[in-house]
Amino acid sequence: MRRLSLITAMASAALLFESAVYAQQPAAPAAAPPAPPPPLGAPITLEQAKKVALAAEAEAKKNNWTYAVAIVEPSGALVYFQRMDGTQYGSLNVAIDKATSAALFRRPTATFDAGLRAGSTYLLTLRAANAIPGGLPIVIDDKVVGAIGASGGSGSEDTQVAQAGVAGLK
């Protein structure tokens, strides 16, 4: 009986010591806050928006994809929209939503996708935040002048088309 009490006491002490060691571990360093978005510039012009859309369309055609492309100014107001023949109708509003989100938040819509995948479910409460990749801010002289939204394929294809559109201004 005495031996059982001694074993029980030793086991209890080991458990207490083990939990004390875990309690003293240093906290993980806090993640660095994200960089602030670029400042706003003068809204994209119609001619600039057409160049962006034309470059996005060329990328889609090169890959035999059909796309809807929306270009908005920083407020999210639509400046230019085009739908390639054969594009699924659901992509029309998705392209506009992506462009609006990228403009209003001045960041790629893929940022929201990554945040949700990391467990930041509060992002679901942000009005006009679209978590589908394919929306990108359009930046000229380090200022956001608008955004593009591309829809018609997978998220990576949508981003590829949108990136080609943004590159069309350079």
Image (cartoon, grey):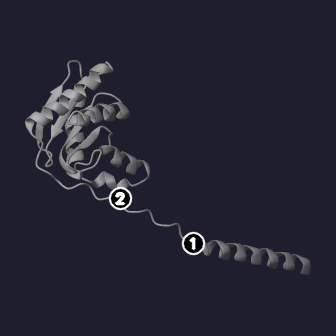
Q: Name the residue nearer the viewer: 79 or 139.
A: 139
Q: Is residue 136 above or below residue 59?
A: below
Disc number for residue 34? 2
Q: Which residue lies furthest to the bottom in this view?
A: 2
State yes or no: discs 2 and 1 in contact (Cβ < 8 Å). no
Query: Where residue 4 appears, x then y in whole percent?
Result: 87, 76
- In the picture of the structure, the residue carrying the numbered disc 1 is 26
Q: Is residue 20 above or below residue 139?
A: below
Residue at 86%, 79% in the rendered image: 6
Query: Where residue 111 appears, x then y in whole percent?
Result: 34, 48
Q: SS at mark 1?
A: loop
Query: Where residue 118 appears, x then y in whole percent?
Result: 44, 51
The alpha-carbon separation of the residues under discs 2 and 1 comes to 23 Å
Q: Which residue lies furthest to the left in this view?
A: 46
How crowded pointer 2 is (Cα within 10 Å; few <14, some 14-19, many 20+) is rated as few
Q: Name the residue nearer the viewer: 91 or 146.
A: 146
How crowded pointer 1 is (Cα within 10 Å; few <14, some 14-19, many 20+) is rated as few
Q: In which quarter of the image is residue 20?
A: bottom right
Q: SS at mark 2?
A: loop
Query: Where residue 55 appears, x then y in whole percent?
Result: 22, 28
Q: Name the residue nearer the viewer: 117 or 7.
A: 117
Query: Is residue 1 visible from the viewing direction of this image?
Result: no
Name the amino acid type tagged 1.
Answer: Pro
Name the amino acid type tagged 2.
Answer: Pro
Q: Quadrant of residue 86?
A: top left
In the rendered structure, which disc, 2 or 1, sits on the residue that comes first in sequence?
1
Rendered-image quadrant of the C terminus: top left
Rendered-image quadrant of the N terminus: bottom right
For discs 2 and 1, the disc positioned in front in the rendered view = 2
Q: Is residue 40 above or below residue 87?
A: below
Q: Name the residue nearer the viewer: 107 or 58.
A: 58
